[in-house]
Amino acid sequence: MAILQNLEQTVTLLIILSILVVAHEWGHFIVARLCGIRVDDFSIGFGKRLFRIAKRGDTEYNVRILPLGGFVKIAGMEPDEAPITAVKDRLTAKSDPDAADIPLLAENTAEDRSYTAPDGFYSKPLWQRSLVILAGPVMSFVLGYVVFCLMGLTTGVPTGKTLPKVGMTAPGGEGQRIGLQIGDTITAIDGKPVADGDQMVDMIHSSANKRLVLTVQRGSKTLTLPATPRPAKDDQDKPIQQVDVTQPGALAALGVQVGDSIAQIGDTQVDSAVQVQTLLQKNAGKITPLIVLRDHAQVDLKGPIPAAIAQTPPTLNGHTIGLLQISPAKEIKRLGFVDSIHYGNAKIYETFYGLGYLIHHRELHKAAGGIIFMYQATGLAVKSGLPDIANMLASLSLSLAIFNLLPIPVLDGGHLLTFFIEWVRRGKRLTDQQQQAFLMTGLAIIAVLFVLIMSNDIIRTVTHQLPQ
């Protein structure tokens, strides 16, 4: 069973990567052809060629042995492509009718001269070359956006509601320890039926250090699993308390309701009922932001803390939060066409907002993941279902677009940077030596990024922080 799961996980990841590569490289390819630029090779993968899919015009479509990427070989774009195009020109000029079908023999041919024919990359004006390079990231962005939009019409999208079903188990958590698996449905806790994911979470949160009996439906089997939610702790290893409002008292004037949980007063995140009462009395009559959790959503309340708070304080119930370190699965629903477009727009906004947040808080390095992380995330998506697989594909496509636009030599953004330099210098290109130095700098940066990202993956693996 484990072998089949690993095989499914591997095949799914390879399919996702292949789709990403084909879309990205097709962007370069189609714009190059529209600009009248010759394309010699469109390959999925790197290294030795496994087989040729087809040959149309000047372009060979190949599959290569290393499936983690791909490329298009545009005539005259790179110095090392000159030998390929030169030999192919000689082959196709012969009388042999099959000469054009000969594989890329020039891959092992030592010859160094630039390809300067009218259909060469650098024979075209700067704006056309820029469009060819920009087309790859644009196509990756378009793919991500289209997949997000199509999810509403096909696989369905999360509605915002949760189910009493395990969507994820944190590595090393209590849920994983007792044997909970993704897809398990918790039908009852201590004999009390569970209606939805929010109720399941509330019952667990209010039971820190208490022994619970979970009734779990796994396929056709009904299991009984004992569990003891562990106290949630902050960075100082101090138990985190949840402060629930039993009666709002004078806070009703601010909009506080029964069942709300007070999370923050002013700039202070609260951790006990006593602290809440102290802060409220200290800020009585002052305009102080108040953040509460209502139905698992954050609500910001603004206005002065009522001066009568000392006479009619709220009734609060403070208790340590208990965790099994599991996440409930999301309810999935299909949408109409217009709502699907709105969903795609929202996901694009969410992606860039999240990126901005990580950059602003200098946490981008923490979110970076390499092939190990992607492999584990693919396994999680496969277990969760097609919506999560589609979401992963779209998210990776957007990430590919953003990453490739970084102004690092060897990436698309690096090429655009050299074109900008050429434009500033009024059409004067970098010399071969400058291009080589630029390229080596880019390779060094990529190598450092690769080491850092792989280190992240290894640390996550050792500390059991990879998604499971």
Image (cartoon, rainbow, N blue to C red):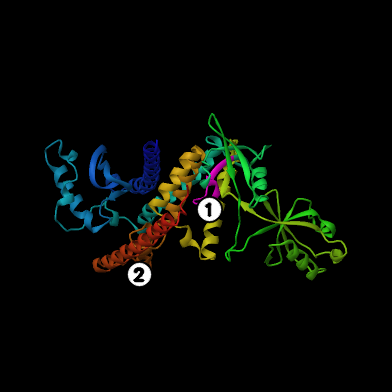
Look at label 2 and name its amino acid.
Answer: Arg
Identify the residue shown where x is 54% and y is 56%: 354
- Answer whether residue 167 is magenta in the image: yes
Estimate the x, y position of residue 130 in percent, counting from the top left: 38, 56
Q: Residue furthest top?
A: 220
Estimate the x, y position of residue 420 in percent, counting from the top left: 38, 64
The residue beneath circle 2 is: 425
* Count of marks placed on residues: 2
- Answer whether residue 56 is magenta in the image: no
Estimate the x, y position of residue 150 in percent, counting from the top left: 52, 39
On the rendered structure, is 123 left or right of 212?
Answer: left
On the rendered structure, is 257 left or right of 239?
Answer: right
Q: Nearer the viewer, residue 401 or 159?
A: 159
Q: Nearer the viewer, residue 277 or 119?
A: 277
On the rendered structure, is 209 left or right of 421?
Answer: right
Q: Where 11 sits versus 113, above or below?
A: above
Q: Where 314 sits versus 1, above or below?
A: below
Q: Nearer the viewer, residue 116 or 286?
A: 286
Look at label 1 and name its amino acid.
Answer: Thr
Q: Where 257 sits versus 196, above or below?
A: below
Distance in Å between CA atoms under marks 1 and 2: 36 Å
Estimate the x, y position of residue 299 in percent, counting from the top left: 71, 55
| Crowd rating for badge 1 (residues with CA inside 10 Å; few <14, some 14–19, many 20+) | some
Q: Nearer the viewer, mark 1 or mark 2?
A: 1
Q: Residue furthest left?
A: 95
Q: Dot 2: what SS?
A: loop
State the mark number for residue 351: 1
Boundaries of the magenta span: 165-175
Identify the residue shown where x is 77% and y is 68%: 278
Q: Dot 1: what SS?
A: helix
Q: Are marks 1 and 2 in contact (CB under 8 Å)?
A: no
